[in-house]
Image: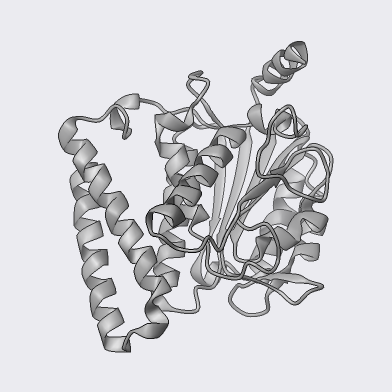
Amino acid sequence: MKLLVLLLGAAFSLPAASYFVTVAGLGGAADYEAQFSKWAADLDKQLQSSGPDVHIVALTASAATRQGVHDTLTRLATEIGPDDAFGLFLIGHGTFDGEEYKFNVPGPDITARELSQLINRIPAHRQLVVNMTSCSGATFASFARKDRIVVTATKSGTEKNAPVFARFWVDALKDTAADTDKNGTISALEAFSYAQRRTSAYFESEKLLATEHAMMTDTGKTAGVRDATPTSGEGLLASAFPLVRPASASTTTTAASPAKQKLFAKKEDLEAKIDRLKYQKAALAPDVYKQELGSLLLELARTQAEIDK
């Protein structure tokens, strides 16, 4: 097994390009719209930090339509080679009626079946699909196949609340703590483990019933697992799929100065308060919700500006 891991790692470290497509779907409300766009922008920024061989297509707002996704993936199928890596990241809302999953985008929604047909035409032997939407667990049957890693924010199509998994997936690419094997690269498996752990901790700390349970598979099975280990038989491909190679640890949470660590802690607290407020939205008067959300977002922006100095 150890020899196989080493061989896979060597093969996946060969010079090749990485192509990533990020789609921020329809928010349905201004607060979700802003949040989805921010997560997508932060994700793209982290992925791009790995160097010039990383090619990113970001589809947000009016560009994130069914036709826009179709045209982008169709074009990439002619540009990507077998030795390249491909990743698709879906951020937003999803729905599942018991038979069909749909990713909510401006105009007609796009189904998991349609997305699967499009990415199946991409010749890259190394593929990653991260579906960070509600109901995303319903997409394993469509997305899972040999040589593809599939990650979902929920365990099934019945977990319908807007997930927070996307926030922690983005955090994983920023935080050297996610690099558990300390090889200077954050793999898809490390990002999944980090985001899953942080998501679970979020619900525990907020004393909320967990409404999402992240899952993954990289063996072609149409059922995901929560713990990707040699025992479960999952995680080998994901451990050898590099996402980012942080240029410097000095900008990360774990290596930051005490002052910066306080800012990171403040940012995390503000983000948790924003998520908590959204859970309480139905019980609040619209003007109260808007005022409290605006205040938190303003403070979050100020804190991020201090971190970026």
Residue at 45% across, 56% down: 203
Quadrant location of the C terminus in the rendered image: top left
Give x and y (percent) for residue 118.
78, 57
**In-front residue for pair 232/255:** 232
Side of 36 relative to 84 (left or right):
left
Picture layout, residue 95 above or below residue 207: below
From this viewpoint, which residue is outermost toward the top?
Answer: 3
Quadrant location of the N terminus in the rendered image: top right
Q: Can residue 217 be seen in this view?
A: yes
**In-front residue for pair 291/58:** 291
Give x and y (percent) for residue 186.
52, 30
Residue 211, picture quadrant: bottom right
Side of 116 relative to 133 (left or right):
right
Residue at 33% across, 57% down: 271
Picture layout, residue 31 above or below residue 272: below
- Total marks placed: 0
Residue at 19% across, 56% down: 302
**In-front residue for pair 128/199:** 199
Give x and y (percent) for residue 300.
25, 58
